Amino acid sequence: MDQWDTIKTWTQSPAVHVGGGTRYTAAATGEQWVEVGEGAHIDDNARIGKHVHVGSFAHIGAGAYISENSHIGAYAHIAAGAGMGEHASIGECAHMGKYSYLGAYAGMGAHVHIGYGAHIGERALIGRHASVGYRDRVAPGDVVASGDIVA
């Protein structure tokens, strides 16, 4: 399967909406009811579950997975190997580092940075402009206030 077969598979489904200028690489997969904003970039082996919204100009790295009912804001960056649990949400211009994880029902505000290998527990909330460092953990249900740094 080449890059164009993947694009045809995504765009021919009546339940998938893909904005203009979106780029896919060969092995990216998306399930039903996916909406991808214009100019987004989805890399090799990225997996996107059902009922997911990917904002305009967002980037989903190689091998990343986005579970069902999740939301990715415009200009957000999900690095290679990162993952999002179901019903998770990240704001615009947010960044998830390589191999990081955002738990189910957890949320990240706009302009949040999650470092390499960081783990955000289920139902945790990370406020705008906050930062979670390299391999740090935020426990399930915890709240990190806007502008705070977890190191």
Image (cartoon, rainbow, N blue to C red):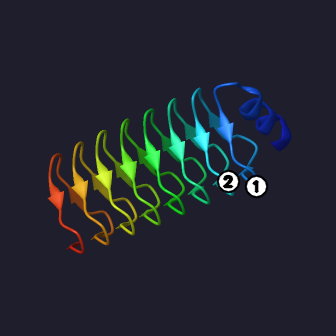
In the picture, which quadrant includes the N terminus? top right
Q: Is residue 57 left or right of residue 123?
A: right
Q: Is residue 2 visible?
A: no
Mark 1 to mark 2 CA distance (whole Å): 6 Å
Label 2 element class: loop
Tell me which label, 1 or 2, sits earlier in the chain: 1
Q: Which residue is mark 1?
A: 21
Q: Is residue 113 left or right of residue 14?
A: left
Where residue 24 appears, x then y in whole percent?
A: 73, 48
Q: Is residue 103 above or below residue 9?
A: below
Where residue 31 appears, x then y in whole percent?
A: 59, 29
Q: Residue at x 55, y 38 (%)?
A: 48
Tag 1: residue type? Answer: Gly
Residues 5 and 118: in front is 5
Q: Is residue 90 above or below residue 132?
A: above
Q: Residue at x 18, y 66 (%)?
A: 145
Q: Is residue 12 above or below residue 112?
A: above
Where residue 4 appears, x then y in whole percent?
A: 85, 40
Is mark 1 in CB contact (under 8 Å) with mark 2? yes
Q: Which residue is mark 2?
A: 38
In the picture, which quadrant includes the C terminus? bottom left
Q: Quadrant of residue 114?
A: bottom left
How many marks do you count on the picture? Answer: 2
Residues 43 and 116: in front is 43
Residues 100 and 96: in front is 96
Q: Is residue 25 left or right of residue 68?
A: right
Q: Residues within 10 Å of mark 2 (few under 14, many from 20)?
A: some
Q: Is residue 73 left or right of residue 103?
A: right
Tag 2: residue type? Answer: Glu
Q: Residue at x 29, y 40 (%)?
A: 105
The circle drawn on residue 5 is none
Label 1 element class: loop
